[in-house]
Image (spheres, rainbow, N blue to C red):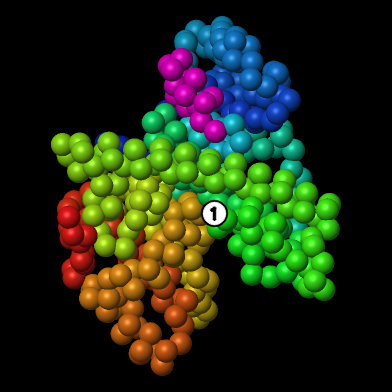
């Protein structure tokens, strides 16, 4: 009896007919390693090295790889590139896309690696692993790696304001602590370097045993005050830029996320700018993506009868996560009547007043999702109090 095989016409979920040249870029300060896999070359990957930042040489190498593939197969194939997110930022990715090349930036931590205690690691091995990850991604294999979405030039530049202010504030703290430490070693306490009368106050200080401040210590403190005052001027300039940016968007015809956030009581200019520039300017499909981007998503560990919770992932944006934890504490003070604050109080009371830190992280996750819905869909948080005009 003859049997006939029936082939389904339904397309498969994973593509296998990828006609392209797959290239990975291993970037370093001195050189770039180009690893490519071309049609007609079997499973052999070719490797070339060029000087770091030499874009004309990179384009020439791509043209040579395409020409070799054309001579082998008689066809011209497009190039698809992949590189790890890192110190070089997104400028190479933008150059490649402007040249008509399909480019991807991958989160290196999302690529599966060997779990052996000692595993070989070289640029050659990493380049080949990137090519294999790119192949799997283009075939449509789910969750093979996490591609980074490059921000626009404007969004990337806008983040500099809050990030620079954070660096300046940390440097200010170091100078203040250094001055207080020098004085404390001489028996002097209660001196505040941030007060406006800091220099006049310094002239009147005496050591713990009643002597005037030693000459060299006083000179060192004066130089520290010079640097501190320069920092204060720079912080004021950065905050002025931030406020100008917020005022421009507040006056726009359509409400921006920053202006909408600033209208909530308890959310100041710094919080509104960070939430806007670090996270809420992006597009998210659902609330899980929002929590995961901030590193506030839970990470369960389940195997057989084992079911444990490892805490939040911390794999997202650390600046956004830190800001949300701080805002969650302030939210309880400024929005006690909101549904989120009542949820936190009930949760802590049900645990007998314990696990406040765990509950505040959960509140930060819920609050971030609620703010995302507020700025994208206009869904007002229940019980929230807005600022008065």
Q: Quadrant of residue 126?
A: top right
Residue of label 1: 196
Quarter holding the N terminus? Answer: top left
The residue shown at (45%, 49%) is 143
Looking at the image, is 357 positioned above or below residue 112? below
Looking at the image, is 349 positioned above or below residue 102? below
Looking at the image, is 66 positioned above or below residue 238? above
Q: Give the range drawn in magenta.
A: 89-103
The residue shown at (80%, 71%) is 210
In x, y percent, where is residue 356? Answer: 44, 80
Whether the magenta-drawn stretch holds residue 101 is answered as yes
Is residue 311 something that shows in the picture? yes
In x, y percent, where is residue 253? Answer: 15, 36
In x, y percent, where is residue 217? Answer: 80, 55
The residue shown at (65%, 30%) is 27
* Crowd around label 1: few <14 · some 14–19 · many ≥20 (10 Å): few
Q: Which of 3 and 314 is in front in this view?
A: 314
The residue shown at (34%, 38%) is 244
Q: Nearer the viewer, residue 311 or 377?
A: 377
Q: Nearer the viewer, residue 60 or 177?
A: 177
Name the element at disc 1: loop
Is residue 148 something that shows in the picture? no
Whether the magenta-drawn stretch holds residue 285 is answered as no
In this rendering, position of residue 176 left or right of residue 278:
right
In x, y percent, where is residue 342? Answer: 27, 79
Quarter holding the C terminus? Answer: bottom left
């Amino acid at each position: 009896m003859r049997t006939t095989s029936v082939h389904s016409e339904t397309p498969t979920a994973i593509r296998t007919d990828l006609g392209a040249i797959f290239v990975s870029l291993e970037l370093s300060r001195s050189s770039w390693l180009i690893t490519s896999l071309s049609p007609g070359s079997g499973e052999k990957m070719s490797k070339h090295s060029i000087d770091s930042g030499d874009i004309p040489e990179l384009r020439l190498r791509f043209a040579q790889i395409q020409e070799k593939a054309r001579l082998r197969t008689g066809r011209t194939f497009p190039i698809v590139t992949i590189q790890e997110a890192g110190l070089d930022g997104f400028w190479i990715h933008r150059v490649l896309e402007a040249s008509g090349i399909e480019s991807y930036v991958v989160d290196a931590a999302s690529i599966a690696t060997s779990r052996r205690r000692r595993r070989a690691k070289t640029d050659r091995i990493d380049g080949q692993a990137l090519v294999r990850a790119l192949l799997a991604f283009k075939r449509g294999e789910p969750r093979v790696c996490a591609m980074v979405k490059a921000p626009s030039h404007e969004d990337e530049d806008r983040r500099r304001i809050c990030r620079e202010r954070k660096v300046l504030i940390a440097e200010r703290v170091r100078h203040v602590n250094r001055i207080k430490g020098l004085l404390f070693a001489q028996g002097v306490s209660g001196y505040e370097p941030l007060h406006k009368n800091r220099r006049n106050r310094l002239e009147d200080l005496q050591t713990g045993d009643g002597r005037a401040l030693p000459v060299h210590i006083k000179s060192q403190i004066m130089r520290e005050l010079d640097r501190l005052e320069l920092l204060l001027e720079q912080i004021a300039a950065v905050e002025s830029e931030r406020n100008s940016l917020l005022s421009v968007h507040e006056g726009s015809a359509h409400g921006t996320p920053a202006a909408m956030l600033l209208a909530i009581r308890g959310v100041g200019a710094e919080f509104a700018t960070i939430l806007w520039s670090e996270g809420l300017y992006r597009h998210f499909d659902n609330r899980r993506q929002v929590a995961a981007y901030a590193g506030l998503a839970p990470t369960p560990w389940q195997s057989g009868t084992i079911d444990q919770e490892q805490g939040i992932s911390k794999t997202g944006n650390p600046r956004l996560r830190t800001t949300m934890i701080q805002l969650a504490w302030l939210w309880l003070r400024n929005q006690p009547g909101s549904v989120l604050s009542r949820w936190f109080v009930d949760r802590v009371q049900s645990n007998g007043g314990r696990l406040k830190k765990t509950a505040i992280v959960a509140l930060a996750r819920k609050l971030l999702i609620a703010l995302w819905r507020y700025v994208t869909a206009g869904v007002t948080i229940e019980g929230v109090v807005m600022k008065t005009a």
